[in-house]
Image (cartoon, helix red, strand yellow):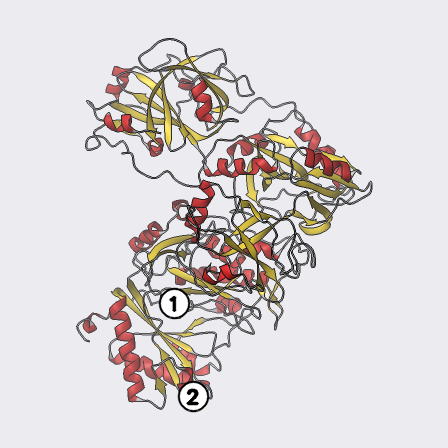
Amino acid sequence: MSLADYRRKRSFDKTREPEPGKPVPKGKRAIFVVQLHHASRRHYDFRLQVGDALKSWAVPKGPSYDPDVKRMAVEVEDHPVDYAGFEGEIPKGQYGGGHVARFDHGVWATTGDPVAQLAKGHLRFELFGDKLKGGWHLVRSGKPARQPQWLLFKDKDAYAGTLEADDLLADVAAPPAADLKRAGSGKAVKKKLATAPAPARKRRKDWAKKALALEGARRADAPTGPFQPQLAKLGESPPKGEQWLHELKWDGYRILATIAGGEVRLWSRNALEWTDRIPEIRDAIAALGLKSGALDGELIAGKGTKEDFNLLQSTLSGERQGALAFALFDLLHIDGVDVTAAPLIARKALLQDVLDGGPPHLAYSSHIEGDGDAAFKLAGDTHFEGIISKRVDRPYHGGRSDDWRKTKLLASDEFAVVGYTAPRGSRTGFGSLLLAKPDAEHGWLYAGRVGSGFNDTLMREVTAKLGKGGVRKPTVHVGTTDTDLRTATWFEPCFVVEVFYRGIGRQELLRQPSLKAVRWDKSVDDLVDSDRGPGAGTGRSTKAAKTVAKATVGKAATKAATKTGEKPAKRAAASKAVATADQASAAVRTPPRLSSPTKVIFPDIGATKKDVWDYYSAVVDHLLPEIAGRPLSIIRCPSGVERPCFFQKHHTAGLELVASVRLKEDSGVNAHYLVVEDEAALMELVQFNAIEFHPWGSHAAEPDIADRVVFDLDPGPDVPFAEVRKAAVDIRKLLEQLELESFLRVSGGKGLHVVVPLNPGCHWDLTKRFAHGFADALARAQPDRFLATATKSLRNKRIFVDYLRNGRGATAVASYSLRGRPGAPVALPLAWSELSKLKRADAFTIHEVPALLRRRRKHPWADIDRITQDLSRWSDVE
């Protein structure tokens, strides 16, 4: 929409109002905002985001909750979306001069195309704010006027009443006295409210009494966080028998709802909080009036059919304004009673009773008992994806099992995107996406490519996600001779797509694949826990993970730890460097829920993913100061350390808590590097099977300024560890002669690290030149002990002084990071006084370090950030 009129009426060198041109935030729902404006006359500015602008109306008396009161709304020029955040004074003499205060804001929805509705002269919509809620209408008046006039009025719904906008000003900033006198003060007698009261609830039932009457019910505290959802296995046909009920398979996003102390919170299947993202669902559940609860269902748009899934994604990303609903199919807890052990049929009957007469944004997922074939036919006739069949007599338990079965009308499955082919003809971005699936033998197996089913918006989004990196050599096992792959671009498994297909060919490739959806809500690691058992579906499959017990999320998230003595300005700047503002804005966030906790990561000692999770939870306050705010690389081992692991440094889809920083690489390409700022982000990477953490020697805020030099002493074959210890001591003494203090770290591998802090920091060019020169001098002085070249064949009985850790983009393993080696060793900082007793570089392990840290009285690197030293004296030395 055009903002030419908005620009023409304003002098942006005189007013603080936002100038057009700022990109509209991506991935956010369409917003509304109402501003109280004391211009020449007092009025409310009512604005709805449609596309990339705010459609705007001036409403002199403000919105009324009385459906019989129709307020005049004069259409004015469109405003930029970031005008929603504007408050304060517009200078006198400028257009609209006077005080502006934000009255209310939130998201909005409509069941049709808003542009088409406005063109016809009647827009029906819903608002989800703090003051304005429920259904509303804008109807174009037939009266002739200089500016189009509309009527704004309330729908006759549960929120309708007698309140006026002027009754809701308790927390709205008051204008200066001069503006108030000039423009007027509105309604003479006002109620002093800040939010609109909730609708009157139906007469409350004793839900606890009803719940306790169910078999297996017991009193228990309500869950305060996300619970592990029950999942279905894929079947070829509906199961037979009266012991099964059959529900339509909704095509949406799985949402878990919890209520504790009357507070509603909403969670994705991956335990990410969605409460503020879907306020209409939050408010609808709150309207049930439950004291505590846990409910399971699917977030849908429209009717929840296959055709409506794109509407759901477009609504959540802000491209459209579809109406959302929560289709509920299970109840686990209600008003202090846990009913998970009750039979499903009894839980659903109670759920239906709870939802009877409830808010329109909540829907009960009905079912057919016994006749699966009839349910399957109904799903096909009504354009649903398939059915979910469930045992009527079974309890609710997290994880995948045969108690729930999924039967699809058209085969579809989820795959990791591992590359793309070049576009042809008039197509831009990419030709086809290359797909892979987990494979027990090869780790990842190429499954085919998909190029159809993309609309223009998805093409742009996916192209942006692909970036410009990649290699020509396949990153997964390819068992085909497809000639088009010779020029393809490959990368590590990046994000997930769901694809329709019509069978599997002889080379185990998908036949006639077409895109169903890009699953931004899922991660590559989710594919390991597939709904297909071994041998089912798309050819060979990775060994299905066993059903697991409910995972413990771990201790609550803490603030991002800051290093002792580190300058606050650097930490603040590092936070600003991340690409996504909301990723770095919250001080305390909730880590994701752990999945597949029983998966074995270190087979030699039987250590599982939960053991890795528990370790990092225990050392988080020690590890975060080493990595927070720095560009970060990780080593991920989705199938354990004895299977192929991969190195990752770029941000990928599915990471919602981990921040990123945009940096230019040596090739000239800009890439988004991982940045961890707090415990929640760290644990998200652990959930993504990260084992090792390797930070840069600089911060994201100042990527070209090194604040550490690392000498990695890497012994060759037949070098006794005693010689490595002696080498570290000798290097420390040499550095002391250069007036540089150093610190010691055991690498968790074969060698030791000697770490030199720099404060103030130095440019990488100088840092690398110094490190290289020091290592060369050492090798020339004692060639029988040291060498400064990485050639492994030359290392026999000598120690490679690895200075290559000291360049822009190079990394070194972080203190307290696990290593992906047998025994689960840990890289650990030590005091120099501890070195003489050290027997091995991998002496400290996953099981010992947490206890060691509890006993330790002083951090051996406690003074590392208090030391003032740099490399400036070598700046002129070549």
Question: Which mark sits nearer the N-terminus, 1 or 2?
Answer: 2
Going by the image, does 189 lie left or right of 641? Answer: left
Q: Amino acid at mark 1?
A: Thr
Going by the image, does 692 lie left or right of 304? Answer: left
The image quadrant of residue 336 is top right
The image quadrant of residue 794 is bottom left
Q: Is there any visible trace of residue 367 in the rendered image?
A: yes
Neighbor class of circle 2 (other Cα within 10 Å; few <14, some 14-19, many 20+) is: some
The residue at the far right in this view is 242
Q: Is residue 628 above or below residue 129?
A: below
- The residue identified by callout 1 is 811
The residue at the far front in this view is 425
Kindly report the distance in space between the C-alpha atoms of the residues bearing marks 1 and 2: 25 Å
Going by the image, does 728 lie left or right of 774? Answer: right
What label sits on residue 796 in the rendered view? 2
Q: Give the position of the C terminus as an image quadrant.
A: bottom left
- Secondary structure at badge 1 equals loop
The image quadrant of residue 44 is top left
Q: Amino acid at mark 2?
A: Asn
- Determine contact: label 1, label 2, CB under 8 Å: no
Neighbor class of circle 1 (other Cα within 10 Å; few <14, some 14-19, many 20+) is: many
Q: Is residue 782 above or below residue 702?
A: below
In x, y percent, where is residue 821? 53, 73
* Residue found at x 35% / y 9%: 144
The residue at the far top in this view is 143
